[in-house]
Structures are given as structure tokens and as C-alpha cells.
Amino acid sequence: MSNDTLIIQAGLSDKPRKSKWPARLDLAQSASGLFLALFMWLHMFFVASICLGEDVMWTVTKFFEGYYFFGTAYPRLVSVVVGVVIVIFVTHALLAVRKFPISYKQYKTYHAHMKSMRHEDTTLWMWQVYTGFAMFFLASAHLYQMFVWPQEIGPYGSADRMWSDMLWPFYLVLLLCVEFHGGIGLYRLAVKWCWPNATRDFLKKLKWATTGFFLIIGFATLFAYMKLGYEHRANYGEPYVPTSISQSIEGTYK
Amino acid sequence: MSDVQKNTAPGGQSRKNRLLTFHILRYNPQDPDSKPHMQSYQVEEAEGMTLFLALTEIREHQDPTLQYDFVCRAGICGSCSMLINGRPGLACRTLTHNLDPDITLAPLPVFELIGDLSVNTGKWMRGMSERLETWVHTKEQELDLSKMEERMDPDLAESIYELDRCVECGSCVAACGTAQMRNDFVGAVGMNKIARFKLDSRDTRSDDDFYELVGDDTGVFGCMSLLGCQDVCPKELPLQTQIAFLRRKMISAGLKR
Ligand code: HEM
Ligand code: SF4
Ligand code: FES
């Protein structure tokens, strides 16, 4: 047994001075949340490219697969990015779960307090816990799929996933969780660290406006994939071939 | 406004006051037979009536066993905070006029219950003060009582005074979801005190010393920014900005360790 283990075991780890870890963990919680929320914004713009047409989405996909840099598409590059997101996601979940009500008594106390206070920020926090909890499962499943089968991302691949693979209800719930959780989280970051010269009122309005904005894009995108998937259901599994690009690319792509 | 119009009905003579119904959470921890229950009282509203006046009316004319705390009746002592329709507030500063005729009163949570609406905030506040050492720390050997005190910049004195307006009513603690779940959390009142002594030029403590007091999850890092504190503080103290300020200072003190 190491000396450190004994000192911690004896409850003396804060002697003579407190640990630096609570400070680091608090910062890491916020930083990981900030990264994820901003990543989700960018992510939304990329997936929403389907609203501008299959070719646009195809181009975005190929861009991330490095096609425009190397002349060949490497879906594994997407796996690398997903891997980084997984690490940050797990870090954030690990740090944020410290704040969960961790017993029935704590949950019941908070819930009664929330109902009696009728205070928006207090209620929103409970929603952050519910949506965060749901994402343990939903986001993990999604990230795993993207990590293992990045080559299936594409206009038809993604649309088939929504429709023929029946994943649209899954993505609908995940969309709501991400937008509410991330929106509330960013608002909380602003009040927690004190955004200079912005009133809470303004930040709250900004929060609802961005949440509304991303939900609208999100619904439109989900609908676009569902429609495409429905139309493409007879040819399930067939990859997309862009209209303007010739056979030579098809060879490297396939 | 509409109440005023109702009160001075055409003709002017017959002022009809509202009949207020108070639903009060009653429980006496000293009495083994006592069970927490709601009891209702009716009181005729009077001009400029505060909850303090209504409660006095009840105790004097209806139920002498009702327990509640008051000292100053002017929002200065902080002893009369209770849950008014579910939210913490000072009873002596709350006009019944601004409330619906059905009013629910309950004791502040978190604090030790003395009985009915009376809680021992003093005990909690004392524990907090001792834990956070909320007094000016000077270097003992340098303290020379025959010397004139150092002058303090008036702006600094003003900003310290601003934070010193806290009356330790406990509303912020009772309004805090974190404090409800975790009873070792210092609460906004505690963090405001630290922010106040951090400002004080006479206090020789460094950020590192303050980190020893609030640099963990029972202190500033436990705060989840729910901001119930800021929204109920009867003194309208800038608790959100003070906690954010303290958090940033404690992060940099912690990272330097
Ligand atoms: C398993 C998944 C997740 C869980 C369990 C989770 C849980 C939580 C909880 C409980 C909080 C509140 C922490 C506090 O009050 O101090 C929080 C904060 C936050 N979350 Fe998540 N979350 C998850 C995923 C995400 C995702 C995917 C995003 C991005 C959209 C995100 C963005 C944020 C942000 C920006 C904050 C504010 C950070 C802070 O207050 O320090 N979270 N999370
Ligand atoms: S900070 Fe405000 S709410 Fe909290 S104890 Fe002081 S006066 Fe009361
Ligand atoms: S009685 Fe002193 S604050 Fe209400």
C-alpha cells in the first residue's frame, strides 16, 4: 500500500493544505461542457447540410473524410474525431454526475424544493439532470455507432438509418436532450463565471432564442433525413453518388 | 390597484376589507405527540398589514401557541424569514396587500426547527462564521492599539459596506437547491462573507488562505449556479457576481497549488 493511500484512508488528505483537485475538476467540468455544447452547434450545421440537398451533405461528409486533402476518402478520420468527442463526453459525464441527487432522499428534497420555489433556474437544473441522465445512454449509443461505422455517414446512409433502421425516434429524443441540456448549460456557464456586462434577463432570453433556433434546424434536418430515407427505402444500403461528379471518384469512394 | 378601487366603493363609506386565510405549517419538535400538519386561520386584512401584523393578530386573538420569530419588525434583524407561499422572505417586510387572500406559511428548511415558523438560524450562522472565520484577521504582533488605524479608501469602504448589509436571515440558504440536498454546503451567505473579507484591506489573509476555507465542493465549487439566493435576498445583495468572483479567484488559487 502506498503512503498516499494510507493518508487518504485516514481522512488526512486535506492536511495541512486542501487539495488542488476540486478547483481543477470544477474547471474541467465547465470546460468539457463548453466544448461539447459548442461542438454540438457546429455538428448541427454539418448535419443540417442535408436541407440544402444531398450533394451538399455529401460534400461535407467527404470533406471530413479528408477527400479534398488527400484525393481519397478516409472514413477513419471521422472515427478519430469521434474518439476525441467520446473522451470529452465521458469526462464531462463523470464530472457532472458528482452533482446528481444521489439518493432518493436528495431527489425528493430537491423536487419538493423546486415545486415550492417555482423558480426557473432551479427547475431548469432538474431538467439538466434528466436530459444528462438520458444522454448517458443515447449519446453513448450514437457515438459508438459513428466511431465504429463512420463510412455509413452520408446522404443515403444517414437517411436509411433514420427511416429503414427506424432510428428517428431515437434521434428525436436525443435532439431534444442535447438542445435543452446544452442551452441550459451554456446559460449556466455564463452566470457561473459571470459574463461581463450581461444581465441574467438578457442571457436567459438569448438562451431560449438559441435553443429555439437549433431546435427548428434540428427538426427540419430530422424531417429531411426521414423523407429521404422513406423515398430511398427500396434501395436501402446503396451509397450515394453525387450528381455532378464522374465515375472516377466513384471508384475511389467505393 | 383593483383592490384599492374595491375598497373605496361608490359612496365611499363601506370599506370592505379582504378576508385572508392563512395556512400555517405547524409542528412542535418538543412534543412527541405532535405531527406536522397545516392549520388555517382567518384574519381580516387591515390597511398596510404585514405578515408580522397578521401573525400577531392570530397569536393574540386566536391561538397563543403559535410560534414565530420577530425582533425589529423593520427588515433589519433578519429573524423573521419564512417560506411565504413556498418561497423564503422576510415576514415583516411582506405586505399582505401584495399576496392572494390564501397565504401559505412554513418554516425555513435547512435550519433547526424550534417550533411552527420559528427556526434557529442563529445556530447555523454561528457554525458558518466559525467555519469560515468571518472576522478580520490581522497579524497579532503588529497590532498596536496606540497607533492610528490605517485609513481606508472610501470607495473600498463603500464596497465592503455593500456586502456587509447581509442580515443573516437565511433566505438564501433556504432558497438554494444545493443546500437542501447537501447540508455541509456553505451557502451564499457564507460565500458573500468570504468575498467581503477578501475585499477588506485590513484582512491579511491571502487567496491561498481563503482556498483553505471554501476551496472544495462544500464551498464555492459546490455551487451549481441555481441562483435562488440572488432572487430571494431581501437586501438584494449581488450574490451571483460575488460567487462568480470568488469562484474565479479560487480556481486560480487552486491551480497555483
Ligand atoms: C452523459 C451525458 C451527460 C451528463 C450525465 C451530463 C450532466 C450534466 C449535469 C448534471 C450538469 C450540471 C452540472 C452542475 O450543475 O454543476 C451538466 C452541465 C453542463 N453540461 Fe452536461 N451532461 C452530459 C452531456 C452533455 C452534452 C452532450 C453537452 C453538450 C451539448 C453538455 C453540456 C453541458 C454544459 C455546457 C454544462 C454546464 C457546465 C457547468 O455548469 O460547469 N453536457 N451536465
Ligand atoms: S445574503 Fe441576503 S438572503 Fe442571504 S442571509 Fe444575507 S441578507 Fe439573507
Ligand atoms: S423582524 Fe427583523 S427582519 Fe423581520
Image: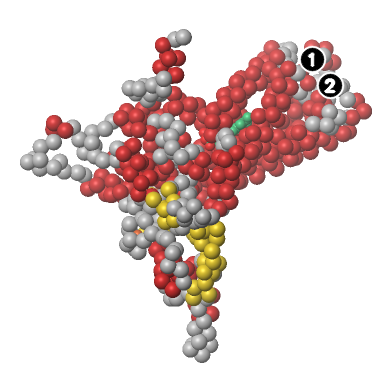
Answer left or right for A199 relative to B166.
right
Question: In the displayed structure, would residue A17 be above or below residue A191?
Answer: above
Q: Sequence-wise, which precedes: disc 2 or disc 1?
A: 2
Residue B5 visible from this viewpoint: no
What residue appears at the point 57 percent right and 40 percent down from the top-left corner? A105
- Callout in the foreground (2, 1): 2
Seen from this angle, which residue lies furthest right?
A234
Dividing the image into 4 quarters, which one contains the C terminus of chain A? top right
Q: Which label number is shown at residue A253?
A: 1
**Residue B59 appears at what percent x and percent y?**
43, 68
Answer left or right for A171 relative to B42.
right
Observer-nearest of B123 and B101: B123
**Residue A62 appears at what percent x and percent y?**
73, 20
Q: Which label number is shown at residue A239?
A: 2
Answer left or right for B82 relative to A236.
left
What residue appears at the point 79 percent right and 15 percent down from the top-left corner? A253
Residue B214 visible from this viewpoint: yes
Q: Residue A9 appears in which quarter of the rendering?
A: top left
Question: In the displayed structure, would residue B238 be above or below residue A245?
Answer: below
Q: Secondary structure at mark 2?
A: loop
Q: What amino acid is at disc 2?
A: Pro
Pointer 2 local density, CA inside 10 Å: few below 14, some 14–19, many at least 20:
some
Q: Secondary structure at mark 1?
A: helix
Q: Are marks 2 and 1 in contact (CB under 8 Å)?
A: yes
Looking at mark 2, is its residue's CB closer than 8 Å to ligand 1?
no
Q: What amino acid is at disc 1?
A: Tyr
